Amino acid sequence: MIVRSQGFYPEFERKAGRKRTTHYCAGCGHGIIQKLIAEAMADLGIQDDTVFVSPVGCAAFCYYYLDCGNVAGPHGRAAAVASGLVRVIPDKIVVAYQGDGDLGAIGFNNAFQAANRGDGFAHFFVNNALYGMTGGQMAPTTLAGQKTTTSPYGRDVVSTGEPLKVCEVFDQLERPVYIERVSVADSKRIMKARKAIRKALEIQKEGKGYAFVEILSPCPTNMKADAMGAAAFVSEEMERAFPLRLFRDRSGEEPPRPIEVEARSIDDIVSADYEGDAIDDLPDVRERRYKFSGFGGQGILSLGLVIADAASEMGRHVSWFPSYGPEQRGGSASCSVVVSGREIGSPAIDHPDVLVAMNQPSLERFLPTVPPGGVAIYEESVPLEATAPEGVTVHPFPASRIAAENGAPKAANTALLGCLVELGLLDMPGEELRRALVRSFAAKPKLVEGNLAVFEAARGHARRELL
Amino acid sequence: MSDSGPGLPRPVIFSEECKGCGRCVEACPKKVLHLTGEVNAMGYPTAEYAGAGCVGCAFCFYNCPEPYAVEVHKEDE
């Protein structure tokens, strides 16, 4: 029997030449820890089902070494990347590996929230009480009085805070299944670390939830010691602030199951239940650019959507591009709709051929953008104070009044739809728009009748008054 | 030496992968590892087995930060 490394690539492709050594300094804890992780992955037979998230810092190159799936997270974000991965590949095993500067400072909230949600990944936290790769600066975990390049007189905990005890903080949370602090300073401690790392991965294999293992680790270079001196610092100094212990093991309990929600594809949700096929170009269809504008709640976005839907049903190229403020109601809202016989380059519109404005601010804002030959229709009750650009036809239209007279006072948008049809600005038969209007109320069938009445009344009015 | 024969446990050190940190030397309960005065191509002094006395505990392997610098053979294949 041979005791040798398992779970590593046979050769490390990081640099030409030395393909059997890591980039770690002599005596660094990272290599020891990664050997334990790789060995456990190999023993548990999970290498092919595991995605390992490398951090930023000295361990950034784990993906050159560990023979499993690998991704690299941005600084501090390994936990956030792991949180994402467990959602998109729920049947795979996810491992995040971070140092104390990475996890304890910039990434603390990501790690903390992942622990609080109990996201199902193994989270290895390598604590050497300083920032390693960047040159030995003070980290949140730096000990009281510890000298680093940015605490040259020793860390003053009054002005810079106490060493951050991440296990103790996470132990306040309900969701973590397993929390342990171990060390790789010597053989006895390494054997305990080996068990804890293995346990965290077993918990993943069994799908039990979030497992957090903090590993105290020597950094000879930045602790300014040789390998044994750094290991002694870990055992003699760091362990006083960070006592080794098993904080929690709930792996024997059945994990709680989230509420089952039917999985729906994004296509299901956004394509309104019908599939769009690839469509042919229609050379006879002229491209029209519409801007619908008003305040949120007037049905501006819906008006654009009904037209886009009808045009799409007729096999035309369509884009619908909403723009609105943070308010649910009352902020300014607009949407840009392009209907074309060719593929549409951009859904954004600076100069609409057809402008519909349902309130004064939007009329003032967009009327000057309509090019010569364009048409602007606005709610009649809005006083027209802006001057129409030359060559632009402007129609006031009593949309609100028609809607109110037909028993659907909120359907001024539908009245404007009728007006647009009748003026021939939609290049579509009224029947197509009538059908699209009915479809748009699929979830609110009570509103169909009133809206159709408004639609027809508005068409009649436009025919009589505007043509 | 008599006790380094076939069947007996022994560490196998790959000196080109060794960085001479000395963790294996310190960890060995039988004190049968030491750093040589010689350096490898990278310039690191390297660890060496005395040739006898290994009990196969593999502490040298687990203390070594390098994946491929040391193996422990517990019997000859």
Image: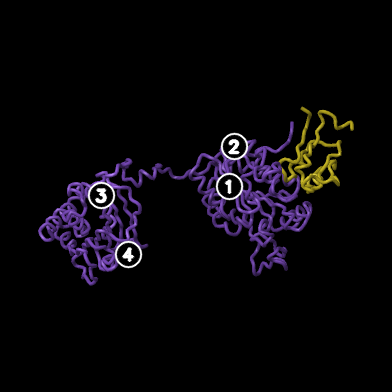
Chain colours: A purple, B yellow
Marks 3 and 4, Cα distance to the nearest angstrom?
23 Å
Say yes or no: labels 2 and 1 on the same chain. yes
- Residue annotated with mark 2: A46
The quadrant in which residue B66 appears is top right
- Give the left or right position of residue A237, taking residue A180 as reference: right
Near mark 4 (Cα within 10 A), the count class, few <14, some 14-19 or many ≥20, is: some
The quadrant in which residue A95 appears is top right
Three-letter amino acid code at the position of disc 3: Ser
Three-letter amino acid code at the position of disc 4: Gly
**Which residue does the image show at 32% across and 51% down from the upper left?**
A319
Say yes or no: labels 2 and 3 on the same chain. yes
Q: Which chain letter matches label 4?
A: A
> First in sequence: mark 1 or mark 4?
1
Marks 3 and 1, Cα distance to the nearest angstrom?
45 Å
Q: Which chain letter matches label 3?
A: A
Residue at disc 4, secondary structure: loop
Q: Which chain letter matches label 1?
A: A
Marks 1 and 4, Cα distance to the nearest angstrom?
43 Å
